[in-house]
Structure formats: structure tokens, C-alpha cells
Amino acid sequence: MIYLDHAATSFPKPERVFRAIDDFARTSAANPGRGGHHRATEAEAMMEDTRRLLARLFGSSRPERVVFTLNATDALNMAIKGVLKPGDHVITSVLEHNSVSRPLNRLANEGVITLTRLEVGADHRIDPGDVEKAFLPATRLVAITQASNVTGTIQPVDEIGKVVRQRDALFLVDAAQSAGVIPIHMEQASIDLLAFTGHKALLGPTGTGGLLVGGRALVTPWREGGTGGDSADPVQPSSYPYHLEGGTPNVMGLAGLREGIRSLMERGVETVLPHERKLLASFRSALKDPDKFQWYGDKDGVGLVSLNLSGFTPAELAGILDGQFDIAVRAGLHCAPYAHRHLGTFPDGTVRISVGWSTTEADMKAAARALNEISATPATF
Ligand SMILES: Cc1ncc(COP(=O)(O)O)c(C=O)c1O
């Protein structure tokens, strides 16, 4: 199988990730807890080490404020529902994934908040000037994705961060597609809340992710419960990470995530985007007639491209690639309906080809060969 769906989840994971999960599950996967037996302490130490790595990776000086969640969706919900109060105004964009749009839409539909959804230009970029213009006295939060999962566009997060900080609001960045692909420094970029997922470019297993909470953000917990310590306290402790981390965490998954992050850091995050762009360039150059396709991706974006071929719905094209060529790609709206309205590809969407650490030039050439064949003789498919 040629796997070109890394934007959904990276596959396979590096061998050492599988081994770390297996080893941890067999030898030391106890329920973490402060002051417990030595296996519990080991599990706690592994989590602390993973927090430390993540804080280093994302430019945070406060590892204790790396809060583990199930995925980016969980982290985004934790941030959105934890900081917003009745009467608040939020600025977001048409490029958001449903994990940002849906919680905001529900709060807006229920009359709790008001919402401005910024349009983007033909280059799919959010204009920091538009963010500034959209500010109202009640603006509490600006929530945007750093890299679109439909066009790949990388947003000017540093510039937007400056605007948000000047206006004293909170800046929430969805780094689901950018974490592990481009260097991120949350403190330098004035990001208050950084949501990431562990199972994409961080190379960990599904069921891992987190929210980095900056010093300015007051987040009310939406999940309260046991924290492995402070049991006498009748309410959730105010100290991080326990403030937002009730319940037994996914220790086995985090052992795998730690190994994924280690392998990424050993390779160097700065090498990832050049590798991905090179792969996409060789894909394009192996296409005999690129003009036969409609292109929606951003050449300067992260490692994905969206395309369509006249005569086929995206689902049909992806089905042919899967069924007849054993190439896995993703068709449809990619959980980002407003982005497809912006592109004019709603409701069918596009075919998204996305690359990752294990993708080779040979994979890209095979994908191009398959598309050459389909586009040359569409009637036979
Ligand atoms: C931009 C973006 N945000 C959020 C998510 C949600 O990530 P998860 O499914 O890990 O919660 C995704 C997943 O594809 C995404 O691409």
C-alpha cells in the first residue's frame, strides 16, 4: 500500500514507537500517581519527561502547563469552553476544522458568544489587518489554525499574535497540522493556548494530544476528577497540569508519543517541511499533464495538496486510487466545510494527498503514474 493520508494520521509510526508502547505496557504501565509505588512513580516520570520534550519543542518555558488530552479536538474544546464566558466575542476564520468551528458555532447558536468568521483571500491567508479590524470591545479570543488541513496554507501566526496581544485578548492556535512540521515558539509568537495532536507529525499513537496553556490564560476545567494526589481537596486543584487533567491518562499512548517526539527531534523539525515540499514537487513534475487537474493546495504550505479531476467526484477518484492502485488518499470535506465553501468545492470536496516522514519519491511517482493513467483514459475507470 502507498499511504498518502498523513494529514489524517501518520502511518506507519517509527518502529521505536511501537516498541516503546509494547515495552511500557509490559513492564511499567502503572497508573501514575505522586508518592505511589515505584511503578506509579516511573509512569509519572515518563509523563513529566514527555511534557518537558513538548515544552522544548513548542517554545514554552513551563512544562507543567503541557496538559495531556485525547487529541487536538479535546484540547480545542478544553480551551474554547474553558475560557469563554457569556457575552464574549470570538474571531475565527473560514479555514477552521470542525473541532474549532463546531464548539464555537454551538456557543454562538445558544447566544452565549458572538462570532466573527473571517474570510481569506485567494492565497488562503488570514490577513492580520482583518483580525485587527474585527476586534470589538468584547473580543476575548482569537482562534485560528496554523496550517490548513485542506490547502496546507501556513498562517502568519507571529503577526496575528502581536495584534491579539496588543488588544489583550487570548490567542488560541490549532497546531494539528503544523506541530512537528514547522518550528513553533509559542512564547515568542504570543500564543496563549496551543492545541496539538500526537498522532500526526509527532508520530505518536492515536488517543494522544495536548493543550499548552500560557501564563495569561485562565482555563476553567471541563473534566474534573482524580489527579493521583491532592485527594483531600474537594475541588479540582488549581496547580498545573492537574487543574485540567482529571482521570487516568493514556500512559501507554504517551510512552509511544515520547518516542515519536524523540525521533522527530533527532531528525530535526526544521528538516520536515523541506522533505515534504520536495516530495510534492516530484509528484507534480511526474504528472504528464498537471493542467488536467484543478489544484487547490498552496505550494508554500505544509505537505499536502488538494486536487480534483473533471469527470470524477473526489470520492470516485479516491476510490479508484484505493481499489485499483492501492494508494490511500482522503476525499471529501476533511471536516472543514467552510474551507471548501471558500474554495468553491462544497459539498463534494477534494482529493487530498498528504505526505509524511515515511513517504518516498517512489511513492510520489507511483501516485503520479496512477493519476496519469486515470486522466489519460478516464472512460476505462
Ligand atoms: C487542522 C486540524 N485541526 C484539528 C484536527 C483534529 O485533530 P484530532 O482528530 O486529532 O482531534 C485536525 C485533524 O485532522 C486538523 O487537521
Image: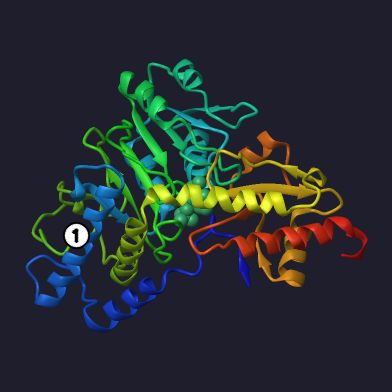
Query: Could you tell me which residue is drawn at 59 percent across and 49 percent down?
Result: 304
Residue 87 visible in rendering: no
Q: Which residue is mark 1?
A: 48
Between 304 and 350, which is closer to the camera in this rendering? Answer: 304
Where residue 265 sits, quadrant-wise, is bottom left
Q: Position of residue 378 (x, y in %)?
A: 89, 58
Q: Position of residue 168 (x, y in %)?
A: 30, 22
Q: Position of residue 270 (x, y in %)?
A: 39, 47
Q: Secondary structure at mark 1?
A: helix
Residue 204 visible in rendering: yes
Q: Position of residue 345 (x, y in %)?
A: 73, 41
Crowding near the residue tagged with mark 1, few <14, some 14–19, many ≥20 C-alpha atoms within 10 Å: some
Q: State the residue lying farthest toward the right.
A: 379
Left or right: 105 as drawn, with respect to 334 = left
Where residue 296 sits, quadrant-wise, is top right
Query: Could you tell me which residue is drawn at 25 percent across and 48 percent down?
Result: 56
Q: State the residue lying farthest toward the bottom.
A: 26
Quarter the N terminus occupies? bottom right
Q: Is 41 drawn above or below residue 265 in the view shown?
A: below
Between 123 and 35, which is closer to the camera in this rendering? Answer: 123
Q: Is 192 drawn above or below residue 314 in the view shown?
A: above
Query: Could you tell me which residue is drawn at 36 percent across and 63 percent down?
Result: 260
Q: How many marks?
A: 1
Where residue 59 sits, quadrant-wise, is top left
Query: Could you tell me which residue is drawn at 59 percent across and 32 percent down?
Result: 124
Left or right: 60 as drawn, with respect to 199 = left
